[in-house]
Image (cartoon, coloured by chain):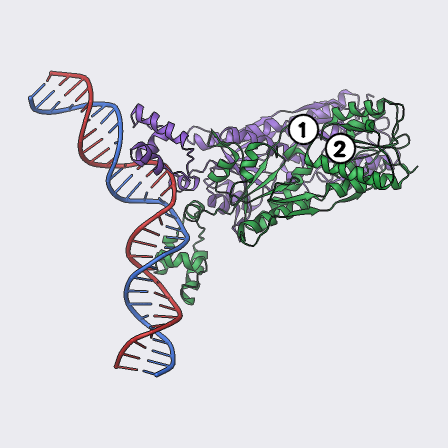
Chain colours: A green, B purple, C blue, D red
Amino acid sequence: MVTIKDISEACGVSTATVSKALNGYGDVGRTTADLIKATAKRMNYYPNAAAKQLKTSVSHNIGVLFIDETACGLTHEFFSEILNSAKTEAERLGYDITFICKNIAGREASFLEHARYRKCDGVLVASVDFKSQAVQDLVYSNIPTVSIDYVYNDRSSILSDNVEGEYELTKYLIDHGHRKIAFIHGESTSVTDKRLAGFYRACEENGIEVPESYVMESRYHDIERCRDTVKILMDQKDRPTAIIFPDDYSYIGGRQGLEEMGLRIPEDISVVGYDGIRLTRALSPQLTTYYQDTVEIGIRSVRKLIDIIENPKTSIAEQIKVKGRIQEGKTVKTL
Amino acid sequence: MVTIKDISEACGVSTATVSKALNGYGDVGRTTADLIKATAKRMNYYPNAAAKQLKTSVSHNIGVLFIDETACGLTHEFFSEILNSAKTEAERLGYDITFICKNIAGREASFLEHARYRKCDGVLVASVDFKSQAVQDLVYSNIPTVSIDYVYNDRSSILSDNVEGEYELTKYLIDHGHRKIAFIHGESTSVTDKRLAGFYRACEENGIEVPESYVMESRYHDIERCRDTVKILMDQKDRPTAIIFPDDYSYIGGRQGLEEMGLRIPEDISVVGYDGIRLTRALSPQLTTYYQDTVEIGIRSVRKLIDIIENPKTSIAEQIKVKGRIQEGKTVKTL
DNA sequence: CATGTTTCCGAAATCGTTTTCGTATCTCAA
DNA sequence: TTGAGATACGAAAACGATTTCGGAAACATG
């Protein structure tokens, strides 16, 4: 390990001067600064992250809260794409990414403690139980955070525009002649609330009344549950002509359920999903869905986070909405 | 931030004693040790990672090399599942995970430099260009590494048993009466070599000669390429009765190609994939494939890595093979 | 009681940086 | 020539932990 001391000796200056030269303080002569920089490069010097951190308390390290329970999270394509995009952007901007969890060197700890322990400059909050105390403690601490798809009071977040998305999707069905539209939605979360809002708004604007029996709860990413729900839904007198699923994954279960009831897509029933994961292009019939721009979401979230980190005075808490778009497949029939 | 000094004052002992008590040195009296531990807990003390690292050069931090080029890597379900499993296991064992890249605080650097900079106790090498100089420099440095699905001389690796897997898969086809089996394989990598070996071995053992035109190169995870390849493959006089695809994803393209040629699966042609990602259960017809135990791979790789880290003397370099299993779908017809 | 052995604890050095503050040199106008 | 103000640099004190080494107290042994 070549240290600042080695460089100082090689250049015949003090460590203080080396440090200042390397960090671009105006406090050092032009020629010495050049010499020091050149020597540092020649000797293949890299600062000791620990020492730097210890002294300055900044780590150039971003924590990520990304818990995978019940096969969501990392293995969910929606999130892994966001993470991937966030990782790339963070690296480009000179920040590393570390996962935050509830363990510190084997001992149990809170998220906040962990983030402090690692001296994370900021934390990206995605795909966790947003309402849990542990997460809230972190979000409302003095560590900068950005949350994805969930809004905390006075904190920044990146949002896939769920109201607008579900609205457009519903509108799409209506434009294709459907007026009896069912919505199988995910478990109760803020995302779900927004999608419900978008759904109802589209219906209202077009004078469509939605019977209560057309709106049912399932769970995101739950194939079996959706299969069962779809069966209950379609087991009523006045069947809908179109179904909106919680997400693309649910389509797999939904399709099974419909198939088992002898209903063909889209001849007998039109369906749409949500997310636009790559999978949808592979299913048959190819699913019509709402594509969420995961790459953009990832990029925007680390940019905002770094903005808060580097400009704590001027950066303001804001909700950034990232628009998606309808991705047409072959599961909607025009009536 | 409560430090060791605060505790020492609260207990009326020196910081040295606190440190020793907290780290379980035998060098401190029973009662004082208990008092110190209790106080530490009460005051909600957590060590300063940077200070600890600076002094001891151990970080309880594992680096992960996980590059996503061309939509593989993180967004590939195979790898994201491994990562997820590795992450969980590492956390359980008290290690954090940080991504290693070629940037240090904005400046360009090598993987090795980055790993050193962050003082990674060890590095997990997965899904990168294994043969690149930058990766080799890291692997052959003094930093413990474990590679996934690639063997370096004298280094440990976790291997999905590709020879055995492809062998079993081929055997499965043979057992179902197929003798004209084509293999569309991925680009030239060590994994591909092994799968080819398994494929040829199964054929040989059963006295099957494989015409050269039955073995074609495509690319992993490349839907379009496989679609095109399949068309060329099936555009010959003596068609195979079964096709082995590079991976499950390729099936999507392959299926399209076959469909466009008017061939039905499995009536006209049997096919199998490789990986066993969740997706396969959703496709229709459901794909017969070889499931790779990603969870086990993830767990074993961090365990081995931590073993090397914590027992550098006794831990030996070894290749650990993780077995998978045939996952039966409906794409193979018995002849 | 004298001496040797444990047991327990603390002073202080150290890891590699950053940063404050003081000082020496230099520049330049009067 | 002189003194004020820049400019360039260094000494040294941190940051929060670990670890060596020595010494005091307690205990055992003859």
Q: Nearer the viewer, residue A298 or B13?
A: B13
Q: Which mark is residue B198?
A: 1
Residue type, mark 2 in image: Pro
User: Does residue B64 appear in the picture of this structure?
Assistant: no
User: Does residue A105 appear in the picture of this structure?
Assistant: yes
Labels in figure, total: 2
Front disc: 1 or 2: 2
Q: Quadrant of residue B215?
A: top right
Residue B197 in the image: x percent, y percent?
Answer: 67, 31
Q: Nearer the viewer, residue B275 or B4?
A: B4
Q: Is residue B45 above or below residue A121?
A: above
Q: Is residue A85 above or below residue B145?
A: below
Left or right of A301 in this view: A266? right
Left or right of A99 in this view: A268? right
Protein chain holding label 2 = A
Residue type, mark 1 in image: Gly
Q: Is residue A308 above or below residue B81?
A: below
Residue B266 in the image: x percent, y percent?
Answer: 83, 26
Residues tagged 1 and 2 counted as in contact (Cβ below 8 A)? no
Left or right of B184 in this view: B30? left
Callout 2 secondary element: loop
Q: Are marks 1 and 2 on the same chain?
A: no
Q: Which mark is residue A228?
A: none
Residue A215 in the image: x percent, y percent?
Answer: 80, 29
Q: Nearer the viewer, residue B75 or A82?
A: A82
Residue hosting label 2: A246
Q: Quadrant of residue A64?
A: top right
Left or right of B282 in this view: A312? left
Callout 1 secondary element: helix
Residue B171 in the image: x percent, y percent?
Answer: 72, 23
Q: Is residue A23 above or below residue A181?
A: below
Q: Within 10 Å of the Cα at label 1, are there few (<14), some (14-19), or many (20+) other Cα atoms? A: many
